[in-house]
């Protein structure tokens, strides 16, 4: 087909060449419909997959064939102006198959300059609405709006099932100088697979998964999947309205931790799974559930694990809320894996990671640290945290590997890291990121928990950002587990010289707002079960374990327990009931939780009996008359009349004893209330004499 001279003279051949060589970052300047001199409109299309293209105007039955302007597949047609100018293409491929498509370059842009400015400044907290693949109806036509941030790319295209993965067909429009590319593609639908094809400055093309994709294939370099999250209707309004009552520092918080590999390979029957989780959690006396492995982290921060659909995860969370169980998700914002189709060198340059390998490399792996000093990356992460809270109704996030982000030299030898601007090892950018994250979370969802999984001693992690802290709701007290489990590993008669280890955690208890984590199935040392790591024969091991868990439950701090697998077949049933009774007691007695973060909530009575390995302390609530006294004996020696000081005069009733026969103990308990006497002990005027079982914990309640 020969082109008319008039049409030839209207063509911008330099721009056409850029399109045909797939190097155009402003395709809307040349493709689509554009008015030209003489009151006419030039319509152009680049379809290298087509043998011929015709235009069908709205309200007209007959289609007009376009002229082939360039043999590479560039078509053009000069038409008289008309209002409205609505049309679609009838495309015939080289095998003779015909399909009708709307011109993607005939639709207006979706992203405005205000959105761009907010993103580039790091404050677009709903960036997930702007980026990724969003199903929408634009100008009366259904399709998907694609957007991606790739500032150093020469050109970006959307490739997928809908265009045979041909990067020449859907070249995206660069928006101003923002580094953002967008394109609305009509006809694309949910479940279509796609990637972004990026031409780097060296001319090489790479295909990248969508950083903001809501769904992804289950392979390292898998495609992103167009996903519709708008179809699910939550019915948890009552829980959301009252959530603040269950999630504050004066409320009982006991978290049941689980993971997908302990629940099956994925979520395929969400209501059944939710019932399984809620039955275990509610029967056990827990207030919350922490689910690991749901958010894979890294390159797919906005997509659940590949074997979980978004709707199924929403169903699980919704059903747990109906059972009055809060849901916390494990979240990793520290690093991402390095592979060809992921975030690493996303547009050919270090975009999500720092360009200095000493800052970006994660020791011991090929993973890369997120560059939290870059506004757009910080925005990506903060918007992601808000995404799980607002879209999925998560009640909290446990932020993994916090220590990695706080320190530049974490796990690195000399020469493998660079100091901050002041010569120190603190990661100033990450510190600012955490402050920003937590202040925004507090503003948008003040009753949502953000928990730092931090093994470091960095100060003020849970102090408010207005007071100079990082602003986390809670910090996991892994130090308590390390100290107490280290103490209990010794034979009882050898524990006296390590007595300070079991007392030490109270020295720093009020430095932070703590959650105490304890994994029952695997201890930190040697990956043994807690039962197996205890010294002695089977009865002694079980007594040790019961004493540990009671001490854990009565110690200040919210609770996080990972039950995991079986401890010992013949004790599992008894032990399960034991933990359930402890948790229910914890929730029913205010002194055990209300003043966890205040000095007034705890009182040492005896922390100097190293030879006897006995600890005695009191727990208080805001009601001065509400007093509990806890006696801990970590030695395998019973005592018939052991005198302990008490905070006030009155009758002390034993409300719990780990040596109760129903828990597998010997029943060496205090069955009757004990009246205090004016008999000085432990620097207190009043005291009581009690029976102390070997390797046990007893809890007494004061009644005036």
Image (tube, rainbow, N blue to C red):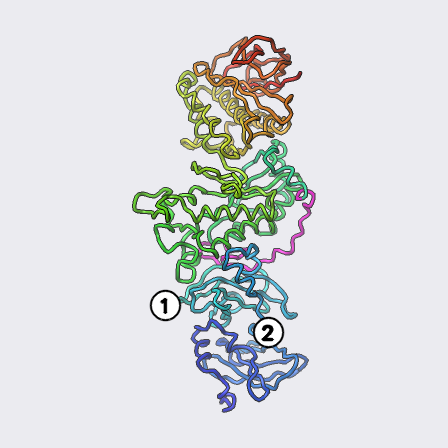
Distance of label 1 from label 2 (alpha carbons): 33 Å
Residue 212 part of the magenta-drawn span: yes
Q: Secondary structure at mark 1?
A: loop
SS assignment at label 2: loop
Q: x, y (%) of residue 348?
A: 40, 62
* Relative to 286, residue 409 above or below: below
Q: Residue at x 43, y 41 (%)?
A: 403
- Is 678 in front, or is 479? 678
Residue 443 pos. (x, y %)? 59, 47
Crowding near the residue tagged with mark 2, few <14, some 14–19, many ≥20 C-alpha atoms within 10 Å: many
Residue position for label 1:
202
Answer with left or right where residue 494 lies relative to residue 578: left
**What's drawn in magenta, residue-wise?**
211-240
Is residue 419 shown above or below 502?
A: below
Disc count in the image? Answer: 2
Image-quadrant location for residue 442: top right
Q: Which residue is mark 2?
A: 102
Which percent across, then down, holds residue 652?
A: 62, 15
């Amino acid at each position: 087909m020969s082109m008319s001279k008039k049409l030839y003279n209207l063509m911008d051949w330099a721009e056409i060449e850029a399109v045909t060589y797939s190097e155009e970052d402003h395709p809307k300047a040349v493709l689509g419909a554009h008015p030209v001199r003489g009151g006419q409109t030039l319509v152009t299309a680049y379809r290298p997959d087509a043998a011929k293209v015709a235009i069908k105007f709205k309200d007209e039955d007959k289609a007009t064939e376009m002229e082939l302007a360039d043999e590479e597949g560039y078509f053009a047609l000069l038409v008289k102006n008309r209002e409205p100018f609505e049309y679609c293409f009838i495309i015939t491929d080289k095998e003779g198959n015909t399909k009708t498509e709307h011109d993607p370059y005939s639709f207006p842009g979706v992203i405005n300059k205000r959105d761009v400015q907010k993103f580039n400044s790091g404050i677009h907290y709903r960036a997930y609405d702007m980026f990724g693949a969003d199903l929408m109806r634009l100008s009366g036509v259904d399709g998907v709006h694609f957007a991606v941030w790739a500032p150093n790319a020469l050109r970006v295209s959307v490739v997928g099932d809908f265009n045979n993965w041909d990067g020449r067909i859907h070249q995206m429009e660069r928006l101003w100088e923002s580094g953002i590319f967008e394109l609305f593609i009509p006809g694309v639908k949910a479940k279509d697979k796609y990637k972004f094809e990026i031409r780097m400055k060296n001319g090489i093309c790479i295909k990248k998964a969508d950083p903001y994709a809501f769904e992804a294939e289950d392979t390292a370099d898998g495609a992103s999947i167009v996903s519709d999250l708008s179809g699910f209707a939550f019915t948890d309004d009552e829980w959301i309205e009252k959530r603040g009552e269950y999630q504050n520092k004066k409320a009982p918080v006991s978290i049941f931790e689980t993971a997908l590999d302990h629940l099956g390979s994925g979520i395929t029957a969400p209501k059944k799974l939710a019932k399984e989780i809620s039955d275990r959690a509610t029967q056990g006396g827990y207030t919350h559930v922490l689910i690991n492995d749901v958010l894979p982290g890294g390159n797919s921060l906005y997509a659940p694990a590949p074997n979980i659909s978004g709707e199924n995860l929403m169903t699980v969370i919704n059903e747990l809320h109906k059972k009055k169980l809060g849901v916390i998700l494990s979240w990793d914002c520290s690093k991402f894996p390095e592979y060809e189709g992921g975030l690493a060198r996303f547009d050919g340059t270090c975009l999500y990671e720092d360009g200095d390998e000493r800052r970006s490399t994660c020791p011991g792996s090929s993973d890369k640290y997120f560059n939290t000093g870059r506004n757009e990356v910080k925005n990506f992460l903060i918007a992601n945290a808000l995404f799980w809270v607002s879209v999925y109704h998560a009640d909290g996030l446990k932020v993994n590997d916090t220590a990695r982000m706080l320190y530049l030299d974490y796990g690195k030898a000399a020469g493998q890291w660079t100091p901050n601007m002041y010569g120190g090892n603190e990661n100033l950018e990450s510190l600012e990121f955490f402050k920003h994250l937590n202040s925004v979370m507090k503003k948008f969802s003040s009753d949502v928990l953000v928990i730092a999984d931090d093994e470091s001693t960095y100060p003020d992690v849970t102090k408010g950002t207005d007071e100079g802290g990082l602003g986390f709701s809670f910090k996991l007290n892994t130090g308590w587990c390390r100290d107490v489990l280290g103490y209990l590993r010794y034979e009882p008669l050898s524990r006296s010289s390590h007595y300070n280890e079991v007392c030490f955690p109270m020295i720093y208890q009020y430095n932070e707002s703590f959650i105490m984590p304890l994994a029952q199935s695997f201890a930190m040392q040697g990956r043994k079960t807690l039962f197996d790591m205890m010294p002695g024969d089977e009865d002694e091991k079980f007594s040790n374990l019961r004493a540990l868990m009671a001490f854990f439950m009565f110690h200040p701090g919210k609770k996080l327990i990972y039950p995991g697998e079986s401890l010992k077949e013949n004790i599992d049933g008894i032990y399960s009931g034991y933990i359930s009774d402890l948790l229910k007691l914890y929730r029913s007695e205010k002194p055990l939780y209300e003043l966890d973060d205040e000095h007034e909530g705890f009182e040492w009575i005896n922390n100097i009996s190293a030879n006897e390995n006995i600890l005695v302390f009191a727990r208080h609530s805001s009601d001065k008359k509400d007093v509990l006294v806890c006696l801990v004996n970590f030695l395998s020696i019973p005592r018939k009349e052991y005198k302990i000081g008490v905070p006030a005069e009155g009758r002390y009733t034993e409300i719990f004893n780990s040596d109760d026969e129903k828990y597998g103990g010997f029943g060496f308990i205090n069955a009757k209330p004990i009246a205090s006497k004016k008999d000085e002990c432990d620097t207190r005027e009043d005291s009581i004499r009690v029976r102390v079982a070997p390797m046990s914990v007893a809890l007494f309640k004061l009644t005036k």
